[in-house]
Image: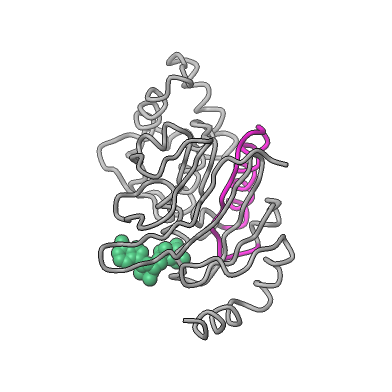
Amino acid sequence: MATELLRVNGISAGTEEKSILHSIDLSIGDGQAHVLMGPNGAGKSTLGRVIMGDPTYMITDGSLIFNGEDVTELAADKRSLAGIFLSYQAPVEVPGVPLYSFLRTITQMRPELKMTARQFRQRVGQISDQLELDQGFLMRELNVGFSGGEKKKVEMLQLLLLQPKLAILDETDSGLDIDALRIVSEGVNRYSAQGDRAVMLITHYTRILRYIEPTFVHVFVDGRIVDQGGRELADKLEAEGYEAYVKAASANA
Ligand code: ADP
Ligand code: MG
């Protein structure tokens, strides 16, 4: 049995106006890769953001236990330091901040990642090479004018540098060409291979599952988990779509 890293315990959440997530239960263990699939608007990104501690969303019920600690009330920056990482569906552009300085700053905030300037430079260079990201990008302003694929590689660069315990990857595979998809997937696998790490992968497409072996697949509809299974469930979804689940959900509503 894998040691439990994250427990989502009956979480209901939403904004002031709208309740989005309804009694979500999920347990993610060390070494596992959980895949969340479901139609647009199902609440997948919201769950990722609620786990990360995005203040846009209010938790109205339930709790989040991370690494044995109740983090339900913890601010996002504290959760980040505790080892939760969220790769955004649409990474923000930050004019005026070179990628290299940004990476140096977020690394220096973590005492466990103590590196000299030289070690840092080598590490960043090594990861950039693995990701086939030209090192010229390091001096450019963070994400400004980067293509979709380049932004996703920069997210992966952060992941490989920070080595969080839980990586939530929100549609990291969307908009990638086949080479970039392989490179990014290899990055995820390189991260996972280090052992006591877990991945929550939000995706629309099974093509990334050619590279990443899912421990569990969860189907998300209307703010609820409506089915779970293994890789075969992802294949079934690819073949049949979500229609049967959506119909069942609206019949129950
Ligand atoms: P998914 O990632 O599964 O496509 P989201 O989690 O982005 O779905 O959205 C779930 C639902 O919650 C959608 O109907 C969306 O419009 C709504 N929603 C998400 N965030 C907000 C917000 N900040 N304000 C209002 N509605 C939101
Ligand atoms: Mg989304």
Write down the quadrant of residue 22 in the picture.
bottom left
Say left or right for 10 vs 76.
right
Q: Residue 208: x, y in percent?
A: 64, 57
Q: Quadrant of ligand 1?
A: bottom left
Is any atom of residue 238 visible in this view? Answer: yes
Against 54, residue 158 (above or below) is above
Q: Which quadrant, please, contains the N terminus?
A: top right
Is any atom of residue 147 visible in this view? Answer: no
State the residue at coordinates (51%, 38%): 159
Range of magenta residues: 177-206
Q: Residue 105: x, y in percent?
A: 35, 27
Q: Which of 101 and 241 is in front in this view?
A: 241
State the residue at coordinates (41%, 36%): 80
Q: Is residue 185 magenta?
A: yes
Q: Which of 116 and 133 is in front in this view?
A: 116
Say left or right for 115 vs 143.
right
State the residue at coordinates (42%, 26%): 107
Q: Nearer the viewer, residue 16 or 192?
A: 16
Against 197, residue 88 (above or below) is below
Question: How is the rendered protein coloured?
Answer: one colour
Against 176, residue 161 (above or below) is above
Say left or right for 35 vs 83.
right
Against 145, residue 187 (above or below) is above
Write down the quadrant of residue 225 in the picture.
bottom right
Say left or right for 7 vs 91.
right
Q: Residue 40: x, y in percent?
A: 47, 71
Write down the quadrant of residue 219 in the picture.
bottom right
State the residue at coordinates (26%, 68%): 17
Q: Does the magenta stretch include residue 86?
A: no
Q: Residue 64: x, y in percent?
A: 46, 46
Report the number of discs.
Answer: 0
